[in-house]
C-alpha cells in the first residue's frame, strides 16, 4: 500500500474538493435561486480537478519516480488515483447530501418537473443511489481522461 500512498493522499484532497465545491454551489445559490445554471456551474469543477491531476503527477514524479517519469507511469498512477477517487466518491456524496444540503434532491426534482420532466424520471435521476453511481463512474471516466492528458504534460521530456 505504501506504493500508492501518494495516490491515496491526492484522492483525499480530491474528495475534500468535491465536498467544498458542493458547499460553494449551495452558498452561491446554484441549489435553489440559480438552479437553472447548476449544470453549467457544477461542470466548472472539472477545470480544478484537472489541476489536481497535474499537481498529483508532479508530486508523484518528484517523490516516487525521482524526477523521471514516463507517460505510461504517469497514466497508470493517474488511473490508480481515479480508482481511489471513485471509491471515495459515494462517501463524499452522502456527506454532502446529508449535511451540506439535505434539500438538494427536492430542489432538483421540483425544478426538473417544472421544466417538463416526468416526476418519476426526476425522482429516479435525483435519488441517492443513482447519484452516487453516476458521480462515481463520472469521476472515474474523467479521471482516465485527465490522467492521460496530465501525464503528457508532466512526463519527463527526452
Image (tube, rainbow, N blue to C red):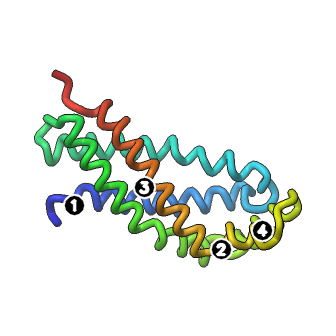
Q: Secondary structure at mark 2?
A: loop
Q: In the image, residue 11 lies at what x, y percent?
A: 36, 59
Q: CA distance from mark 3 to mark 1?
A: 18 Å
- Which residue is depicted at the point 14% across and 36% down? 67
Residue at the spot of label 4 = 109
Q: Closer to the N terminus: mark 2 or mark 4?
A: 4
Question: Contact (CB < 8 A) between labels 2 and 3?
Answer: no
Mark 3 burial class by Cα count in 10 Å: few <14, some 14-19, many 20+ = many
- Judged by depth in the image, the label closer to the viewer, 2 or 1, is 2
Residue at the spot of label 2 = 127
Q: Closer to the N terminus: mark 3 or mark 1?
A: 1
Task: Give me the disc on residue 140.
Answer: 3
Q: CA distance from mark 2 to mark 3?
A: 20 Å
Q: Secondary structure at mark 4?
A: helix
- Which residue is depicted at the point 24% across and 42% down? 74
Q: CA distance from mark 2 to mark 4?
A: 9 Å
Quadrant of the rendered structure where residue 113 is? bottom right
The answer to whether residue 59 is left or right of residue 100 is: left
Please identify the residue farthest to the left as the structure is shown. 66
Question: Contact (CB < 8 A) between labels 2 and 1?
Answer: no
Please identify the residue farthest to the top as the structure is shown. 158
Check the picture and name the quadrant holding the C terminus.
Answer: top left
Q: Nearer the viewer, residue 84 or 5?
A: 84
Q: Is residue 79 above or below residue 132?
A: above
Q: CA distance from mark 4 to mark 1?
A: 39 Å
Q: In the image, residue 66 lies at what x, y percent?
A: 11, 41
Quadrant of the rendered structure where residue 127 is? bottom right
Task: Give me the disc on residue 5.
Answer: 1
Q: Closer to the N terminus: mark 3 or mark 4?
A: 4
Amino acid at each position: 500500500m505504501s506504493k500508492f500512498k501518494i495516490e491515496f493522499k491526492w484522492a483525499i484532497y480530491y474528495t475534500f474538493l468535491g465536498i467544498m465545491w458542493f458547499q460553494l454551489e449551495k452558498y452561491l445559490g446554484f441549489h435553489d435561486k440559480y438552479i437553472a445554471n447548476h449544470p453549467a456551474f457544477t461542470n466548472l469543477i472539472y477545470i480544478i480537478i484537472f489541476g489536481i491531476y497535474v499537481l498529483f503527477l508532479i508530486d508523484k514524479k518528484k517523490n516516487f519516480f525521482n524526477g523521471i517519469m514516463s507517460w505510461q507511469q504517469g497514466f497508470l498512477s493517474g488511473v490508480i488515483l481515479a480508482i481511489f477517487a471513485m471509491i471515495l466518491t459515494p462517501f463524499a456524496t452522502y456527506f454532502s447530501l446529508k449535511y451540506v444540503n439535505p434539500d438538494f434532491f427536492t430542489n432538483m426534482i421540483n425544478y426538473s418537473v417544472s421544466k417538463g420532466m416526468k416526476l418519476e424520471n426526476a425522482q429516479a435521476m435525483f435519488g441517492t443511489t443513482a447519484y452516487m453511481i453516476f458521480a462515481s463512474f463520472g469521476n472515474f471516466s474523467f479521471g482516465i481522461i485527465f490522467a492521460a492528458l496530465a501525464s503528457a504534460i508532466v512526463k519527463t521530456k527526452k
